[in-house]
Image: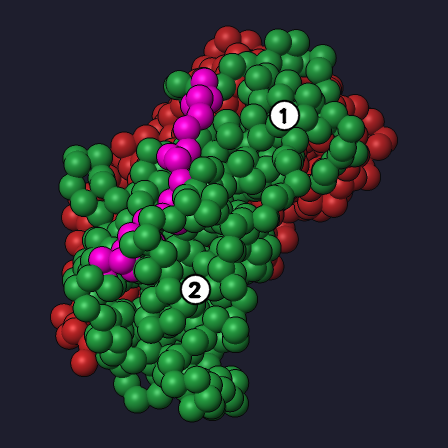
Chain colours: A green, B red
Amino acid sequence: MKKRIISAVLCCTAMLLLTGTPVLSVEYPDIGPLPERKAPNPKAVELGKRLFFDARLSGDAGLSCATCHNSEQGFTKHTDDKGQPMQLSDAYPGSKHWRNAPTMLNVVYKGKSFGWDGRLDDLDDMLRDMITDSMNMNMDMQLLQERLKQDTNVVALTKDAYGDKNMGTSQKGEMTHYVARNAIVQFLETLTSKNVPFDKGQLSPKAKEGMALFKGKAGCIQCHNGAYFSDVKPHNSGVPENPEVFKDAQRHFTYVAYMMFMGVDDRLNWRRDVGYYTISKDRQDVGKFVTPTLRELKYTGPYMHNGVFGTLDEVIEFYNSGGGEDRPGLKSPLLKPLNLTAGEKDALKEFLLSLSGDPIKFDMPKGGKIEYQPLPNWREVRN
Amino acid sequence: MKRYGYMKLLVGLPLIAAVVFSAGYAVAEKSAGQVRPLSALPDYPPIPTDNASGKNVFPSKMDEKQELGDLLFFDPKVSGDTGIACSDCHDPKQGWGFNDPISRGYPGVVHWRNSQTAVNSGYLNKLFWEGGTTSLEAQAPVAGLGALSGNGSPDMIESRLTFTPEYVKRFREVYATLPTIDKVWEAMSAFERYLSQPDTPFDRYMKGDKKAISESAVRGKALFEGKARCIECHNGPMMTDEKFYDVGVPDPSEFEESGMQQVTVRYQLYTKGSAEEIYRTSKSDPGIYFKQKRLEDRGKFRTAPLRYLKYTGPYMHNGTLFTLEEVVDFYNDGGGVDRWGNKTKILKPLKLTDQEKADMVQFLESTTGEEIRLPVPKVPDYAPMADWQPRK
């Protein structure tokens, strides 16, 4: 790790010497429009959409995926039910989350290191953990499939979409938790940017100026690169702690429970979100979080892993001052004060906003009250 | 055990006759020597050496560990969504059980069996209707973490208790540690041992007080040990041999009528582990089939103890019999339907008269003392750790 950082620094220095201006883009995968992905099976999408909004996927049937990844709020959540701004996510009843819910928009492009701390590299695995984690949905996968098998509409949709497949079962077209997760992933495939000015090459002059800064003077591209606008690697940019995590016992113990689950043995001593350290158990990784995408920022505030910044202006100001502070050796050496002028900051913001497309709109699945109807001919039908 | 030898012989002799009389294969099912006589409960249940606690039982004062267990037993922090405590299905007002045929479950689900009383559970060697765990310390986590009951997770429960100053204080006093999940189950078990009732009219009668139970109950006891043959399975001080039988208890109507119940039935068949064909076709609770997946075990459950009955109806593993009168009638008819071909051959129609049935009920009620009621403890609150400072 250290070696890589040193070589990156050396590279930058060498280039500065050669060109006199920091042109960094050659080193990093260039930004660009999102590539086409294979179209998901529309029937599976229909099922997945229904399940995304289905509270039967949680232990006490109290919340669905959409509770924290709200379709009206950029598939994250910035405003609570009383209209108050939120920094930190909801969680399973009896716990409170200590991080900001990441958006589901374009998440299929991330490809690996899902979650702020990059805990899992497979979307299906991540979904499994979100459904079964005690602070998220606290659900038993086998109970999940039996609940869904009680719903004749879900059973029919499953037969329709997966009639030629048997996933985790001997029966083709049978609802299982494998099917449920697969369908939700198929639905996530549809949550991708549409009509993005940047992707269509429709940048205003000011946004173009912002793009030049992004690639050059501001150096954003060092981490926010590629079509997804993220290197999908963990970095420590010194984001200040969100005091609510430690002032609210429920948030703090939820965080402690997570560290316990992840096998962090000094979990009671930390008074900060250790981020990637939870995964690597390497002290150098304390405070690192996986670079988030910059797409759809218009809809996906608040920003940072703990939602401490409510606006893009705050985020730009934060990086303009070289990021936050941390103990020596922890903060990324990539961050330096940028000395951007007010106009440059404005241009950068305009560019960032040009990475957002049309709001995602779709017909909500018909659902309503959760009811379990007894199956007709219960004694005769096979389970 | 030794002191029962003489009585065993006396009881054993007529039993051998009965067994040989009824059918030859019954010998394979149980031998006469296994039938222990009825007896009074010891003054307190066995206390494991690795979970020492006082020998206090209700109504004497609890020791510190039992008090901690009492608090935890009533605290919904020991569940998934802090919505349910042990005491919700083992409710002091409902005989430390639950008075619906099928127990309530975790929010969003229903159970599929009747909730058993916590009273006298410390005297049992096999817990749950399948008798699958052999100590209270092993039983508590199954209930506390199971998806149909507490749905808790150890990391979350431990963390919650660590952020509850009252628990930090009490665990330090009792265990000299911060709260840990194993100690949670241990303290609860110590508390459950406190919920013992060794001084019922029946126990006093067995200890020589011949006036402790009514004449009708004395006649009922004779029937219990004689004509009705209950003692073949319901023997010893807890009135259970802790062995497994199919007595043909019918399915509860909920299985047909409730969608949520059907979810649970399938879930249990799946998650407890069944051969696929059993999962696909079972519409009843196959009992201890889950333990060894033997078809000949389907429909068998551990013999229920017969204490504290006055407060613990409805009866049987799925609560389908509402009163002791119904239970006596059920056995008077020779038990229920032989659904699996596994029904015990011990059961035969008993041809009890109405008076005899009434005497039986009187006797069964004599194993219940005063209702055990305790003040419900106030659940302690969380508090943040006091030492947080912004990072420099």
Residue named by callout 2: A224
| The stretch drawn in magenta includes residue A357 | yes
The percent coordinates of residue A369 (x first, y second) are 39, 19
Tell me which corner region of the image, top left, top right, bottom left or bottom right, holds residue B85.
Answer: top left
Q: Are marks 1 and 2 on the same chain?
A: yes
Name the kind of residue labelled 2 in the image: His
Observer-nearest of A163 and B200: A163
- Left/right placement of residue A306 relative to residue B132 reads left
Tell me which corner region of the image, top left, top right, bottom left or bottom right, holds residue B279.
Answer: top right
User: Could you tell me which chain the residue with mark 2 belongs to?
Assistant: A
Q: Kindly tell me whether residue A98 is visible in this rendering.
A: no
Q: Residue at the spot x=64%, y=14% of the render?
A: A378
Number of marks: 2
Observer-nearest of A78 and B267: A78
Residue named by callout 1: A43
Magenta-colored span? A345-366
Name the kind of residue labelled 1 in the image: Lys
The percent coordinates of residue B244 (x first, y second) are 66, 38
Marks 1 and 2, the one that precedes in the sequence? 1
Q: SS for tag 2?
A: loop
Q: Residue at the spot x=48%, y=11% of the render?
A: B355
Tell me which corner region of the image, top left, top right, bottom left or bottom right, holds residue A207.
Answer: bottom left
The percent coordinates of residue A236 (x first, y second) are 36, 74
Q: Residue at the spot x=42%, y=56% of the render?
A: A293
Q: Kindly tell me whether residue A346 is visible in this rendering.
A: yes
* Residue B317 sits above or below residue B143 on the image: above
Q: Residue at the spot x=44%, y=21% of the render?
A: A363
| Cα gap from disc 1 to disc 2, whole angstroms | 34 Å
Disc 1 to disc 2: CB gap under 8 Å: no
* Residue A183 sits above or below residue B387 on the image: above
The percent coordinates of residue B91 (x first, y second) are 32, 36
Give the quadrant of the C terminus of chain B: bottom left
